[in-house]
Image: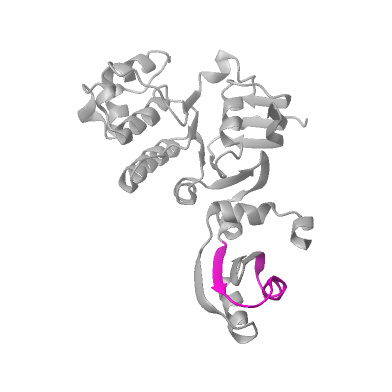
Amino acid sequence: MTAPNTNDVVVLDDVVRTFGPVTALDHVSLEVGAGEIVGMLGPNGAGKSTLLSLVTGQRRPDTGTVRLFGADPRTAAARIGLGVTPQETGLPANLRVGEVVDFVRGHYPDPMDRDELLARFDLTELVRRQTGGLSGGQRRRLAVALSLAGRPRLVLLDEPTTGLDVEGRRALWSAVLDYHREGSTVIVTSHYLEEIEALAERVVVIDHGRVLADDDLGAILAQVQSHRVSFDSPATAATVEDLPGVTSATVDGEHHSILTTDSDAFVRALVDHGPSFTGLEVRGASLEEAFLTMTRSPAQEAA
C-alpha cells in the first residue's frame, strides 16, 4: 500500500468482503479526500451498503485495509467525527422528536444546537411529536438530521431519500448541500440517478462488488445515459446489431429491443439503411440497463 494522503478521510485498499459464497466487495480500492461530496451509484445489491458498513467499523474486511481519518474505523476515536444515516433507522416510538435529538447530541463533545438542527430539516414544529406518530417522510428527515447532530467531519448517507416524495427529496438534498458547503465530507449512496446528479461532484459506480467507474459527474453521466430503442421487424438480430451505436440487443420473435449510446444515429441508420420496421419507441434506459452495458465483458459482446 502506498503512503496515505494525510488529506484523505476514507481509504480502502484492495478490500474484499464476502458473505458465504457471495462476494459483496471484490478488491475495491477507493480514496475520499476532505471536503469532497461523493455519490456512490449502483443498483440494489451492488455492494454500496457493505462498503459503508466497513467505513463505519460495523464490519471488517476479509482482506485489504480500511482507514477512517487515518485510523481503524472500529476505534471510537476515529468514529467521533462520523455521522451516519443507514437505509433503515429504528426510532423509539414513545420518545418525542426533541428528546431523540437531545439523546443523540449528548454523545458528542461539540454537538449542533438543537434548534439549529431541527430548523435545517424543517422539523421545528414537530419537536414535541412522538416519533411513532411521524409520517415516513418525517422519520426520514429526522434520521438524516440525527447524522449531523455531532457536527461530523464525514457524513455517510445510505439511500437517504428512499420513500420520500419529490418535494421532500429536494428539501433534504438542500439541507445536505448546505452542510457540505460548511466544509464537511459527504458520501451518499443511491440507485437514483437524479439524486446523484443533485448532490455529487464525483461519482463512483459500483456493481457486483466492483468499482466500474470513478470520475466527475459529467463523465459518469456520459456513460450511463444510454437509450432503449424497441421496434417490430422480421430482421435478424445480427442485422440489427450491425447498426451504429448498439451496445446490447435482444429479440423476441419479431420484437427487437436494443440499448444504444446514440439513439439519433441508430434511428437514422434504421430508417435509411435498416430493415422494415413498425412500432418504433425510444426511451431513456434505466440505470440497471445502463449498468448491464458497462459490465458487458468482451466475451459477452462477441457472443
| Quadrant holding the N terminus | top right
Where residue 238 appears, as percent x and y from the top left, is: 72, 72
Q: Residue 227 in magenta? A: yes
The front one of 108 and 213 is: 213
Where residue 100 appears, as percent x and y from the top left, is: 32, 18
The front one of 172 and 227 is: 227
Q: Residue at x 69, y 71 (%)?
A: 237
The front one of 36 and 39 is: 39
Vertical relation: 100 (above or below) 21? above
Vertical relation: 245 (above or below) 90? below
Vertical relation: 12 (above or below) 253? above
From where the camera sits, is residue 5 visible?
Answer: no
Q: Place residue 173 in its image quadrant.
A: top left
Q: How is the image coloured?
A: one colour
Where residue 257 appears, as percent x and y from the top left, is: 59, 66
Q: Residue at x 78, y 57 (%)?
A: 298
From where the camera sits, is residue 76 visible?
Answer: yes
Question: Magenta span covers which residues?
Answer: 226-248
Q: Residue 257 in magenta? A: no
Q: Residue at x 64, y 19 (%)?
A: 72
Where residue 206 appears, as percent x and y from the top left, is: 62, 43
| Quadrant holding the C terminus | bottom right
Q: Place residue 106 in its image quadrant.
A: top left
Instruction: Say whether residue 243 is left or right of residue 96.
Output: right
The front one of 164 and 144 is: 164
Q: Place residue 174 in its image quadrant.
A: top left
